Amino acid sequence: MVRAPLRSRNHTVDHAAAVTWALAHDVCGVGGRLRQDAGELEHAVELVTRAYDERVGERLRRFAELPEGTFVWTRTPDGPLRLGRLVGPWYQDRSSEAHTHDLTHLRPCTWLPEPVEDDEAPAAVRQTFDRGGRNLQRIRPTSALGDVESETAALWDDLAGDA
């Protein structure tokens, strides 16, 4: 399970527009615009590493290698949390929209149709977002705050059943 901010490290990118676009297109993504088609993941990681740095390349690799079915949490700029689940493999999107939002490395994602209220979200999820940041970040499955994996799965089952 991960926190996916859907936020570019480039401060000129409109974060609200990027999140809205990702949710509307049923994708989860990370940035790292490239000037060329990367083709396979290994080549994309190499190109991103060269264009940005090793940390950005490794973030792309971690994102692309997450198992299908992984839960992802994001927060919209106006506050509500959104819960999704990765349902497909990594791909590079070279469209102008993806480029504008700096979300060019994508995974198909099923997002719950409605936001999750903060008080419904597992404590570990809230804590992860409270720390802030722009990076994809693993949310620890068990902690003093509870078992975030089982709590998220139960929440998904409850809310996806209503959809």
Image (spheres, helix red, strand yellow):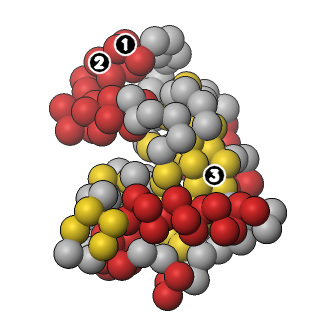
Q: In this view, which residue lies farthest toward the right? A: 163
The amino acid pointed to by label 2 is Glu
Local SS, label 1: helix
Residue designated by label 3: 22
Judging depth in this view, the residue of 47 and 90 nearest the camera is 90
Label 2 vs label 1: CA separation? 5 Å
Residue sitting at 80 percent across and 63 percent down?
A: 163
Res. 59 in view: yes
When asked about the image quadrant of residue 31, the answer is top left
Whether label 2 touches label 1, CB < 8 Å: yes
User: Residue 49: x percent and y percent?
Assistant: 25, 27
Residue designated by label 2: 46
* In-image side of 69 versus 53 (left or right): right
When asked about the image quadrant of residue 60, the answer is top left
Numbered label tally: 3
Instruction: Of the two numbered discs 1 and 3 on the same chain, state the one appearing first in sequence.
Output: 3
Label 2 environment density (alpha carbons within 10 Å; few <14, some 14–19, many ≥20): some
Instruction: Of the two numbered discs 3 and 2 on the same chain, state the one appearing first in sequence.
Output: 3
Q: Is residue 49 above or below residue 56?
A: above
Residue sitting at 55 percent across and 65 percent down?
A: 154
The disc at residue 146 is none
